[in-house]
Image (cartoon, grey):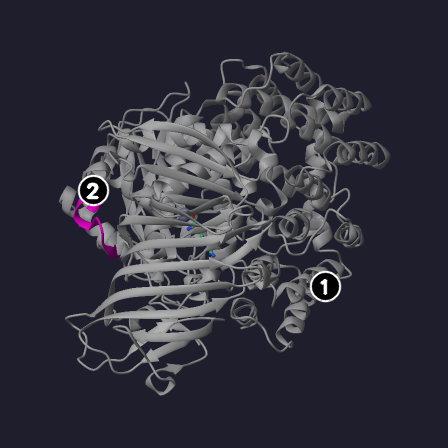
Amino acid sequence: KAIYLNDYREPDFRIDTTELTFALEEDSTLVSSKLVMQRNQNAENNAALVLHGQELELLSVSVDGKLLAPEQYEVGEETLTIATLPERFVLEIQNRIYPHKNTALEGLYRSGGMYCTQCEAEGFRRITYYLDRPDVMSVFTTHIIADAEKYPVMLSNGNLIDEQQLDGKRKVSWHDPHKKPAYLFALVAGDLLCSSDEFVTMSGRKVDLRIFVEPQNIDKTEYALDALKRSMRWDEEVYGREYDLDIFMIVAVDDFNMGAMENKGLNIFNSSCVLANPATATDAAYQRIEAIVAHEYFHNWSGNRVTCRDWFQLSLKEGFTVFRDASFSADMHSATVKRIEDANIMRTVQFAEDGGPMAHPVQPDSFIEISNFYTVTIYEKGAEVVGMIRKILGTEGFRKGSDLYFERHDGQAVTIYDFVAAMEDANGVDLTLFKRWYKQAGTPRVSAESVYDAAAQTLTLTLRQMCPDTPGQTGKLPMWIPVQLGLIGGDGQDMAVNVEPASAWTADSQVLHLTEAEQTFVFHGVTEQPVLSLFRDFSAPVKVECEQSNEELLFLLQNDSDGFNRWDAGQRLMLNWIRSAADSQFELTDDARNAFASLLADESLDPAMVSYLLTLPSEAYIAEFSDVVDPAAIHKARKAVQLALAESLQAEFIACYQRLRSDASYQPVAADMAARSLKNLALSYWVKADASGLQQAERQYTAADNMTDQMAALVATVNSGDRAQAQTLLDRFYAQWSGDALVVNQWLSVQAGSAEMGTADYIRSLLQHPAFDWRNPNKVRSVIGAFANQALVHFHATDGSGYELLADAVLRLNEANPQIASRLLGPLTKWKRLVPAQSQLMKAQLERIMAQGNLSKDVYEVVSKSLI
Ligand code: ARG
Ligand code: ZN
């Protein structure tokens, strides 16, 4: 059942051109394909052709114009095999598919009134028989025939080359001159409107930009178009990458398993990741849209022009592209804030994955279902690994490496090690040791011990690393860990130091290279006892163990020149508070109170950063920093600290709120977003402190001309604990927005994810609400996903009701949409980390799922691995 990287073999055949004709009929689609193929040089002379196919109704097969008799081919469960074939041949296949019945949302399916596709990773085989693997690249021509009235818009990859009226029907033809694997194929047909713009590339070519949406959404396309143009310019400026077709299209669809897909020249987006206007989308949504538009656009080079040899190389394109979109977002907003957000995801979600049963390396060795490997490890840890290469090589060296990579591999399907080799060759460095990051799963732990010698003016720093065992991997070797650091003197300034051994220190970037299990470094010229600031800028995705007192943490919070480590020190301090508040009250020291008060009042600081400095670690974050997770205790302790902050800084929060209020009309620009984030954080604390906060929240709710402020007021009210007022605003909100699905999804998730509301019973009532629909992944995520990932105290209810609810949802979706069912399972797989009573209840639900017959590959893989 499992597939292994070690079993990789080059394909026996290639497909030079692919010509597809889709006749979209009333309730089925007729697919005709014409493949110009040849046997590869290296292939055995008599190797049979084995095509992939799933849920296809095969009508006919012919080779070089001659119809094959049924005994000349063999149809298996998921294959079509033709044993005897010449060296070169034209293969023609006709088959029928049923998009209306496709609830898995892979291959060709219906969303609302339109047709759309999702082919990555292995969805193309649900369209027609094909060599559905990324190292088979072909030039595609696509014809679409459909009712002219119902489907005025018919799109595929590349350029439009022909259009014809047939009686009542229309036929359009698209041609994509760039060779691509089948996973990048796309088709869209529907009654859509489009917003257009244009972009002139660095070499002066004009590119048409279009965003297609259902008519009611035409007022939500402006921001994505703007983000697209900025992405195109940025990729030219920062990576020297130019767009390569005459047209670039984005289509928004409501039913979509993931965020978006980088199909060549025709990106398809989950509507929640592209549509926005000020009244309906929050600042967070705007930033997500900007990042995802950039991500998919950047894939045109990192993914499409240079693609993956096989799916074990997924991080080649995803890790690199996430790294690229993160750098873009850092340039558009605040680099420090972006780093904080990324570290937060690594520490809460990715470290948890590394510590659980699905732990896998950035380049996995095996999988049962590739869809299960679109993970935070492949994406976010993969991006961190690329980021460490940049830390090691420096910005210029990294650019040389990426230039060589794109030049050397344009038009090829390659491996992660080809990427590393380009980085090595362009810089004359040896990254052999570094490559362990790709093959060893788990989060390394680094401990630090330092001794100061006042007489010698030296600081001796000993760093030790170890990486815990993960399923199937023991005895890991030391990694190459870049430790960016500073030694801070009493004046708050970094000291100028020399390091021994000098070879382990890059002075320009203040990076120490830890490459062994244990290493000792001596810093010279240390004129006073310093405060250590380690892993600045989150320079490596590791867990750090370094004893520092609350006084030292407070000092770092106030003085570190590295914004990321100011935040990190604050989080560590707050974690200490939360631990100490376990079953008692909590009170801030005067020093701490004054430090936070001065941050709140300091107008020279970026308000977005201050907002993060004052945000408590989430319950999931706290859980990741606990040996045994007790969700009820975490919830209680965190609340005590939150209340203490709210009460002791009440005057400062109110002053900050009043200072940042603005009557200017809403703009989705960085400075305004930053101000709103701090203002709304202040409101959330104010609401906790005193009834006047709740009144202010209602005033803000009523006056808001934008969703950011309206939603912040709603969330603050829901989380205030005043159930009556919460219900009043929730009802007003629904009455106003019941016609807008994306806004209703936010309404669902505010309730489902709230510790004040989201009990299992309440979730079951939301599932009955007319706004809910099991067939729509966004709604499932808004309710079940928000519940299991955010309302932790209810998901982990002591009677097990939360786990049962999640298992019910998984079983309900197992057959209809295996990808979504499998993704929902995440929180249950962490069962071994919980206190014993909870742990047993979670395991029981996994066993209940396991006991069902007919588990999809997706669900089977996650549940069976979780129970080992
Ligand atoms: N390549 C897409 C992206 O990251 C994700 C598509 C994932 N699709 C899937 N069925 N797992 O941009
Ligand atoms: Zn991607």
Q: Secondary structure at mark 1?
A: helix
Q: Mark 1 is on which residue type?
A: Glu
Residue bearing mark 1: 804
Q: Secondary structure at mark 2?
A: helix
User: In the rendered view, would you say 10 is above or below 589?
Assistant: below
Q: Position of residue 816 (x, y in %)?
A: 61, 64
Count of numbered circles in the view: 2
Q: Does the image show residue 529?
A: no
Q: Does the image show residue 726?
A: yes
Farthest residue to the bottom: give it.
71
Is the distance from the Cβ of mark 2 to the nearest ligand 2 atom less than 8 Å? no
Q: Quadrant of residue 856?
A: bottom right
Image quadrant where one finds the N terminus: bottom left
Is the distance from the Cβ of mark 1 to the nearest ligand 1 atom less than 8 Å? no
Q: Mark 2 is on which residue type?
A: Gly
Residue bearing mark 2: 401
Farthest residue to the right: give it.
724
Q: Position of residue 304 (x, y in %)?
A: 31, 49
- Residue at x 73%, y 38% (from the top left corner): 738
Q: Which residues are magenta?
A: 405-414
Label 1 crowding class (10 Å Cα cut-off): few <14, some 14-19, many 20+?
some
User: In the rendered view, would you say 356 is above or below 788?
Assistant: below
Label 2 crowding class (10 Å Cα cut-off): few <14, some 14-19, many 20+?
many
Magenta stretch holds residue 412? yes
- Residue at x 29%, y 65% (from the top left corner): 35
State the mark number for residue 231. Answer: none
In the image shown, does 823 or 294 lie closer to the viewer?
294
The tag earlier along the polypeptide, 1 or 2, is 2
Q: CA distance from mark 1 to mark 2?
A: 50 Å
Q: Position of residue 282 (x, y in %)?
A: 60, 30
Q: Position of residue 110 (x, y in %)?
A: 56, 55
